[in-house]
Amino acid sequence: MKVTQEDLDKVAVLSRLSIPAEESGKYIGQLDKFLTYVENLKAVDTENVKPTTYALPIQNVFREDVVKPSLDRELALSNAPLKEDGYFKVPRVLEE
């Protein structure tokens, strides 16, 4: 597929891009190479290929929950600008 100046102008308008006239030749070449590559991909036989979300196999890796000592509540609240009844007090975000 040969990309023309009109094609580049149309893509620029749809993408809300401003392409300087002196750089348009470079972008026409890049867009042409990309579309040629996509055309080549159409020739690849994908009949027996299952759709996939990830290129590599992924599995969840779980670890055991282990109870460990945590930060002391008073120490955690020591620098809090607002605290109430042993908790951080923050401004209300959601209205009732």
Image (cartoon, rainbow, N blue to C red):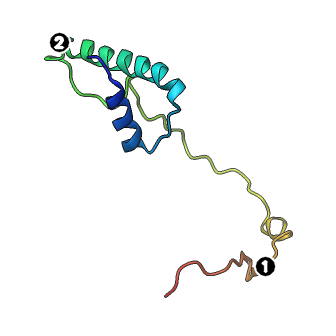
Q: On the image, numbered disc 2 is attached to which residue? A: 45
> Which SS class for mark 2?
loop
User: Where 19 sits versus 87, above or below?
Assistant: above
Question: Would you say 92 lies left or right of 8 here?
Answer: right
Residue 74 vertical position relative to residue 53 in the rendered view, above or below: below
Q: Residue at x 18, y 16 (%)?
A: 46
Q: Residue furthest left?
A: 47
User: Which mark identifies residue 82?
Assistant: 1
Helix, strand or loop for disc 1: loop
Kindly identify which numbered label has been placed on residue 72.
none
Name, please, the residue furthest toward the front: 21
User: Which sits in the foreground, 89 or 65?
Assistant: 89
Residue type highlighted by circle 1: Leu
Label 2: how many residues lie within 10 Å, few (<14), some (14-19) or many (20+)? Answer: few
Q: Nearer the viewer, residue 51 or 63?
A: 51
Q: Residues within 10 Å of mark 1 (few under 14, many from 20)?
A: few
On the picture, is 15 further left or further right than 95?
left
Give how far across and how far down residue 60 sits, in percent: 44, 35
Where residue 39 sits: x, y (%)?
Answer: 25, 16
Quarter containing the N terminus: top left
Q: Earlier in the sequence, mark 2 or mark 1?
A: 2
